[in-house]
Image (cartoon, rainbow, N blue to C red):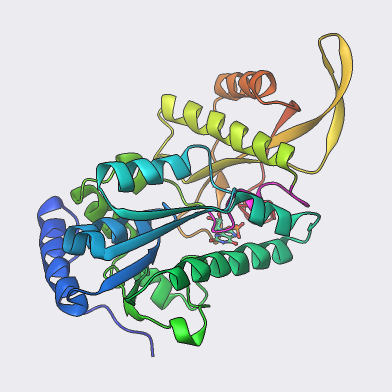
Amino acid sequence: MAEKRPESMQRIVNFDLANAFIDEQVALIRKQVGNKKVLLALSGGVDSSVVAALLIKAIGKQLVSVHVNHGLLRKGEPEQVVEVFRNQLDANLIYVDAVDRFLNKLDGVSDPETKRKIIGGEFIKVFEEEARKLDDIEFLAQGTIYPDIIESKGVKAHHNVGGLPEDLKFELVEPLKFLYKDEVRVVGDALGLPHGMVYRQPFPGPGLGVRCLGAITRDRLEAVRESDAILREEFAKNGLEGKVWQYFTAIPDLKSVGVRNDMRADEWCVIIRAVNTSDAMSATIEPIDYSLLNHITQRIVTEVKGVNRVLYDLTPKPTGTIEWE
Ligand code: XMP
C-alpha cells in the first residue's frame, strides 16, 4: 500500500512554513543517518537539487552526490550543478563525464523505447560503479515526491535508482516524499537555490535523447542543444519563462535543401514546441507572437550549425504528445 501524506500536514505555501519544514527534516535526517554517509544521484532537476540542498544543510559532507553527465542535458546544466553544489554549497560532489559512454551505447539506435531503456540502464550502471568505489555508504537519498507515490506510473523512474543490485540496497532517505511539486519549489527557494533551478520547466529523464529523433548523432544533438538554448533565452527575455509550461526544440532525422552563401545546402531543420497543460495528459499550444517566432527563427538559422529551417508545431495533445518520441 502506498504511503499517505499525514492529514495534519499543512500545505507549504510560504517561507515560514518552508523553514519550519526544513528545520523538522534536518532534525529527522540527522536522527536517521547519525554519522553515516548518504549517497544521492544529483541530476540537477528540481527534486534531486532540493534533496541535495536539504541534506547538505543537515549533514554537510556526509552527503556524497553523484552527477552523471550523460551528454543529453541542456546547455549549461552540468556546469550549473558543479557551480551551485561544489563551488557555492561546498558539497561533496562526484562529477562523472559519461558522455562518450552513453553516445557510444546509443549509436545507431533509433527506436524510442530502446533509447529510453539504454539511457535508464546505463545510468544505473554508471551510478552503481561510482557507489562501489565508495566505502561506508549506508543510505541512499532520493528525490521522490508525493505525486511519484500516488501515481502508480510515475515519469521519474530515472531519478529513483531502484534498479541497483541487491548488495547495494541502501536504506532510503526521502525527505520530500509527502510534498507536492509547488511545495518542493518553495522549500528549494527557502534553501537559497537559484530561482532558475527551482522553477525550471519539466525535463524528461532521457533528456535531449528523446528530442534528437531517431538514431542520435553528435551534430544533431549539438544542434538541438543550441537551438533549445536560444529558445529558452528568448522566452526568458520576453517574459514567457515561468508562464509557458514546457517549451523546447526537437530535431528530426531530416535534411532539406536550402540556400546558404548563394549555394544550395542540405541541412537539418528544428521544430519548436511550446505547450500549456495542468497535468500533461492533454495540452494546448502556446500561441507565440509572430515577431518573436520570426526572431527566434532568424537566430537559430544563423547561429546553429547545420540548420537551415525552423518549424513551429501547432498540434495540441491529443493528437500530438508533448514530446516528439
Ligand atoms: P508526452 O510526450 O507523453 O509527455 O505528452 C508528457 C510529459 O512527460 C514527459 N516525458 C518524460 N519524462 N521520461 C521522463 O522523465 C520520459 O521518458 C518521458 N517522456 C515524456 C514530457 O516531457 C512531458 O512533460
Q: If the picture is divided into quarters, which one holds ligand 1?
A: bottom right
Q: From this viewpoint, is residue 51 visible?
A: yes
Q: From this viewpoint, is residue 244 visible?
A: no
Q: Quadrant of residue 218?
A: top right
In the picture, measured across the screen, residue 317 lies left or right of residue 56, that is right
Magenta residues (range): 204-216
* Residue 60 percent across, percent down from the top left: 21, 59
In the picture, measured across the screen, residue 47 lies left or right of residue 316, that is left
Judge by depth and name the residue closer to the eye, 306 or 80: 80
* Residue 235 percent across, percent down from the top left: 47, 30
Residue 142 in magenta stretch: no
Main secondary structure type of the part rendered in magenta: loop
* Residue 145 percent across, percent down from the top left: 35, 68
In the picture, measured across the screen, residue 112 lies left or right of residue 175, that is right
**Residue at the spot 26% in from the left edge and 70% down from the top edge:** 175
* Residue 228 percent across, percent down from the top left: 58, 36
Q: Residue furthest bottom?
A: 1
Judge by depth and name the residue closer to the eye, 71 or 135: 135
The quadrant of the image that shows the N terminus is bottom left
**Residue at the spot 33% in from the left edge and 78% down from the top edge:** 172
Judge by depth and name the residue closer to the eye, 122 or 314: 122
